[in-house]
Image: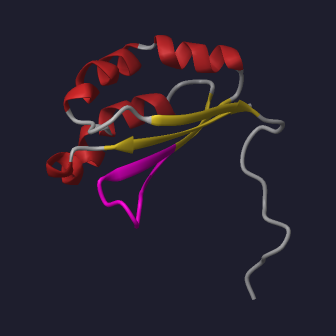
Amino acid sequence: MIFITVKFTVRPERSEEWLSLVDDFTRATRQEPGNVFFEWSRSVETPNQFVLLEAFASSAAGEAHVGSEHFKTAMAWMPEVIAKTPEIINVEVPGDGWSQMAELTPA
């Protein structure tokens, strides 16, 4: 599985609309056959920073994502909204999705 984490630092004046702006991109990516997950979170320490956790079933699925029209569309408008170049971690990991944490269960 390809696991990717990206930190997007958005221009402060655009941060409140970020999740709306990426909504079409998010929905389209989640519909891709090789997408395992595509999840946004907002930093509690840096309010104009958003963290994207995404995974694809294979390298081929990741390449298809980058070649998709919705990816190209997002890359075309994002430079006007981001405050700096996104930071990324992209690794191949064993497995095919989320596992359960062994150290903690509900009481």
Q: Main secondary structure of the magenta part?
A: strand
Magenta span of residues = 38-52
- Residue drawn at point x = 59 percent, y = 14 percent: 63
Number of callouts:
0
- Residue drawn at point x = 31 percent, y = 39 percent: 23
Task: Give above or below for 71 relative to 93.
Answer: above
Which residue lies most toward the top here?
67
Tell me which corner region of the image, top left, top right, bottom left or bottom right, holds residue 75.
top left
Which residue lies most toward the left here?
13
- Residue drawn at point x = 36 percent, y = 51 percent: 49
Tell me which corner region of the image, top left, top right, bottom left or bottom right, holds residue 10.
top left
- Residue 35: horizontal and vertical position, in percent? 59, 31
- Residue drawn at point x = 53 percent, y = 35 percent: 88
Task: Give above or below for 88 relative to 65.
Answer: below
- Residue 73: horizontal and vertical position, in percent? 30, 18
- Residue 78: horizontal and vertical position, in percent? 27, 29
Is residue 2 in view? Answer: no
